[in-house]
Amino acid sequence: MGLEVPDRALTHLLLIALGYVLGSLPWGYWLPRLLVGVDIRALGSGNAGATNVWRTLGFKLGLAVALLDIAKGAAAALLGRWLGHDLIGVLAGVAAMVGHWRPLFMGFARGGKTVATTGGVALAVALFPALAAAGTWIAVFLATRYASVASLAGALALPAFAVLFGASWPVLAFTIGAAVAIVLLHRTNIARLLAGEEHRIALRRRRPAPLGPSGAPLHSKRV
């Protein structure tokens, strides 16, 4: 007797489980540990996501984390669509988002706020709405320098663009659910925005002043 081929339902469950494992790859925690030797959870907001890495450790490292988080969401959803269909792609993508929020490889401790991973899933299941929402994110961020405001704007724009581009019902349901989840995960940011305590992200870091022999910074004299 040969090996029995797993039935379709089991294959779908395995794809969803794989999506969770992919989402659990905590690049926002691993890269700062490996490259800088710090625990990102002890810096800034304590969040193991790309925004906190960017804010505390610089643009290059933050961008690397963001791209890897996008890639894992996209990989989970693409595998689901390839070996299943739209609904399985969405469910595998949602599992990746849950994995990013509560990563298996961090003992289910708090991870990131799922924005980049959600973007990767959206690129896989709704390319044009995702690109339009990404454009919204960029425009709002450049105008405000608040990553949280840009994330909220991009999240709320995603289902609107999904409707505009005629997305299927599983994809539309995903975009609505993702928008709600991102808003809820940013509720502390919303509170800080309302209190005027949210921090803007500087696009360029200031160069530190040169130090004198005593270790004190040197100040240029005006002439």
Image (cartoon, rainbow, N blue to C red):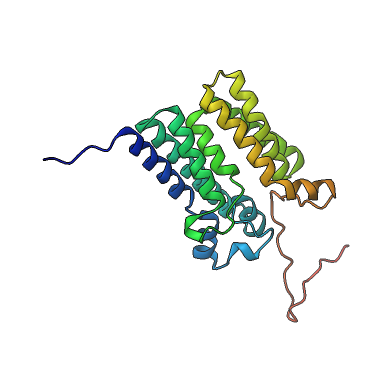
Residue 34 in the image: above or below residue 25: below
Instruction: Determine the residue located farthest toward the left in the rendered image.
Output: 1
Closer to the camera, 81 or 148? 81
The residue at the far right in this view is 223
Left or right: where 136 falls relative to 82: right
In the rendered view, would you say 161 is above or below 139?
above
Q: Residue at x 58, y 45 (%)?
A: 114
| Most foreground residue, 24 or 154 | 24
Image quadrant in which the N terminus is located: top left
* Quarter of image, res 92: top left
Q: Find residue 56 and report its image quarter.
A: bottom right
Where is residue 165 drawn, in percent x and y? 57, 19
Task: Please name the residue shown 70% across and 46% down the image.
Answer: 186
Q: Can you name the residue that lies furthest to the bottom here?
A: 214
The residue located at (69%, 58%) in the rendering is: 45
Q: Quadrant of residue 43?
A: bottom right
Q: Nearer the viewer, residue 64 or 175?
A: 175
The answer to whether 192 is drawn above or below residue 118 in the figure is below
Q: Residue at x 49, y 30 (%)?
A: 125
Residue 157: horizontal and vertical position, in percent? 66, 29
Viewer-closest of 15 and 199: 15
Residue 40 position in % (x across, y down): 60, 62
Looking at the image, residue 132 lies above or below residue 151: above
Image quarter (top left, top right, bottom left or bottom right) of the C terminus: bottom right
Numbered-mark total: 0
Residue 183 x %, y %: 69, 40
